Amino acid sequence: MATFAAMFRRTEASAAVRARSAADVFVQDPYRLRPLPGEDVYLYSKPIDNSRVVRQADPAARRRSVSTVAVSVATAVLLMLLCVPDVLNIVNGYKIYALEKERDRLEGERKYLQLAESRLLNPARMQQLAVQLQLVDPDPARVVYTTGDSTLAMNAGGR
Amino acid sequence: MIKFGGFPGLGGRLAALALGAVLWALIIFCRLVQLQVVSCHTYRLMAERQQQRTIELTAARGTIFDRNGKPLAISVPVDSVCLNPLRVPDRPMAANLLARVLSGVDAADLLKKMDKAVNDYRRLGRKARGFGFLWVKRKITPGESEAIRSLKLDWIEFRQESQRSYPDGSLASHVLGSVDFKERGNDGLELKLDGELRGRSGTARVVADVARRGIESMMRNDAEPGKNITLAIDERIQFVAERELKAACELYGAPTGSVVVMDPETGELLAMASYPTFDPNEPPEKGADPSVRFNEPVSVAFEPGSVFKIVTYSAAMETAGIRPDTPVNCNRGVIRLAGRTVHDSHGGLGVLPAAEAFAKSSNVAAIQVALRVGKENLYKYVRTFGFGEATGIPLPAESRGYIRKPEVWHPAAIASVAMGHEVSVTTLQLAQAASVIANGGVLVRPRLILSRQRPGGPVEKEPAVEPKRILKPETAITMRRMMEGVVLNGTGKAARLSGYTCGGKTGSAQIFDRASRQYTHLYNGSFVGFAPVTNPRIVIAVTLNGVKLFGGVVAAPVFKAVATETLRILQVPKDLPEEVLPELSNPEEANDLASAEGSEPPEDLGDAPAVPQVAVLAPPDTAAPDRPAPVLVSAAPEQVVPVGPRVPEFQGKTMRSVLEESLAAGVPVEIVGSGVARAQTPPAGAFLNPGQRVRVEFR
């Protein structure tokens, strides 16, 4: 068995000698492997029997410990709960901001579509297309104006 | 000396440590007080500047719709490109890149601006004007925006702005007007309703993160978007009106013209066209003729000519008991009044029923009728019809027109006013006056706006001005019939519609030339009409200024084309069988020239004019010297000297009796039918002109 103290002492005492002898060995036999660092340190466990040592029960200390932990946890939770509204505010703020952006974008898109539709239905363009497609006005006798009333007689009656 | 646990010397060191700790805590505390209390305001401002930013909530400009909900003017969001020249890593490269993507951006120019900004900053630091910001191009197209964004360059920034678009180009441009670069109205409805269309922009103070994303609004004044305006204009009818007006103006060489289409019952303006037009999408060019932007039907007053006889005859029916069959002596087309001689454009007209004289647009007859009405009454009815005052339409620079008060009329002014000279009116006022006839004698103010609505708000209907009865219903209906006669037998034959009855009145007034201070041989050719006659749905007023032909030739066909399309669009049932109508063969049939001879131009057209040397009269062959001498007329119509035999009463008599009586009286007759005489034209008591016969119908 070697303690750390003994080990260090031995190491300190013979460090120079061992360094020299290792170098000698290396010189003498060039094919021999170099020792690994700390190869000469031997660690082993020293069995200690603590079975006879019994911790004395201290309920007061235990209670203090438990209550301290509980208070700490409760405080932490409380602090976290106090932060929750702020965090939620921030998260919701981001969401609202993003939604507002989205709403503005969609509104702009709707207006663009409205503009595009209006350009496509421009009467001048319609007339140009009608000429290109050789469309003609229908024979007046074939035109019946319907106003959604139940009879044609009613349709013909008023404005 | 403090002793700790019996360790000598420890107390002193601990005391020193404690003192140091206390001092440290004190210093911290003082610093905290300095930060939190003394300099609190400064640091709060710094923090706010860093974390918060104020953003302007722009109010979207309201959309202008036509009556069917089609947008005529709409604002769309567009991107503008800007950058911080100090952040641009390679300025020449950036300038070339941006110039390649953005049309109209010059690379050299942009590079020069960036270099100047950087140099200014280096020289002046933060005092440099507008340091750290440079517009590259404002209001770029969506394609350009897409292209720039795809480059993913962090030194390029975008700002959102608004762009006003007019999807139909020049359609209804004079009504809509236009806006400047900052979307402030500068013409038309855009100008007049600018306050309502613009709304009110708001502000929001937001807490932003490092990426400038908003987290929370600290304070917010919401923007109030502009109101959407719905007009009474129908895009399709407007298109037809502009198309036909342009074609007519180009055909007859008219520099300007106007068309107004109106619903006589409600006063809603279905179309209001002005020629020439402009495209409000394009900003006006420097040095461009501003008159292109004049709203002719609203802002430009002119002498209307014979169209004005509608007022004269209406007043006569109301005040002088004139009926359609009342004989009016046209004096062979010449009348002398207070030293002034007025000629008819048609020669040879003698005594005619008032309806026929109106249909043939006899100036002499109109003067005779006006003399019976009297100048006070005539003036009253001119004003009652809405002339000389603004209609109240929400468009800028509306002309009230002009009519002098009767106290300052010169003795012959009544003759001029009776045939539409010495007054100035707008095409809109003419349409308003014709609506009085079309809707049974009620003056309805023109309405351009149907409703307003703030986005998300309720629809606010535009209140209509209370209609005012100014004519008896029977007078209005009689005038309708007389105006139908103009189209069927008179000067307005070119306006006759296929499948619909219609009525109207032509007008041709000489134009006063300010330079030569004389009336010229160019006319304001007009036509106002309505259709169908029994239940008029539309009133159309057409004016072509500066033409060489008469209103019945140049303006009546425009009425016909616009009315045909409008009635089809409005799905008005036809009240006549379809027929192919003959073309107007002789333009002289439409000669309705209101002679300006001796007229003074209205004050807003010129002052103290010279009396024209020659007025446009009847064609030379009809102005023959073998005519009877002009009848001298004084202010009282009963002093008119008759020129032919008086027509006997034939009604109820047999054919033999009629023939004997006519031979005895020297009155030639035209026999129609057989049996007993039931009707005769001219009526009994009228004076017959030389060459004229009495038509007697037997049944």
Image: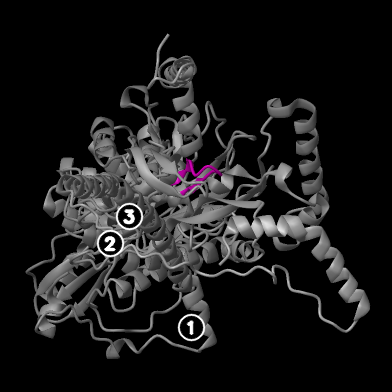
Tell me the element at label 3. Answer: strand
Q: Quadrant of residue B555?
A: bottom left
Residue matched to label 1: A130
Q: Nearer the viewer, residue B40 or A11?
A: A11
Which region of the structure is painted magenta?
B177-188
Q: Position of residue B159 (x, y in %)?
A: 55, 49
Mark 2–mark 3 Cα distance, whole angstroms, equals 103 Å
Amino acid on which disc 2 is placed = Arg
Image quadrant containing the N terminus of chain B: top left
The residue that label 2 is drawn on is A52
Q: Is residue A159 left or right of residue B363?
A: left
Numbered disc in front, either 2 or 3: 2
Q: Count the labels in the image.
A: 3
Report the side of B495 relative to B312 (left or right): right
Residue B416 appears in view: yes
According to the picture, the residue beneath numbered tag 3 turns out to be B231
Callout 1: SS: helix
Identify which residue, B204 or B111, lies in the foreground.
B204
- Disc 3 crowd rating (10 Å Cα; few below 14, some 14-19, many 20+) is many
Q: Is residue B398 magenta?
A: no
Q: Nearer the viewer, mark 2 or mark 1?
A: 2
Q: Position of residue B70 (x, y in %)?
A: 36, 64
Question: On what subunit does the disc labeled 2 rest?
Answer: A
Say if B614 sits above or below A54 in the image. above
Q: CA distance from mark 2 to mark 1?
A: 110 Å
Crowding at mark 2 (Cα within 10 Å: few <14, some 14-19, many 20+): few
Instruction: Give the residue at the far left of this rendering.
Output: B652
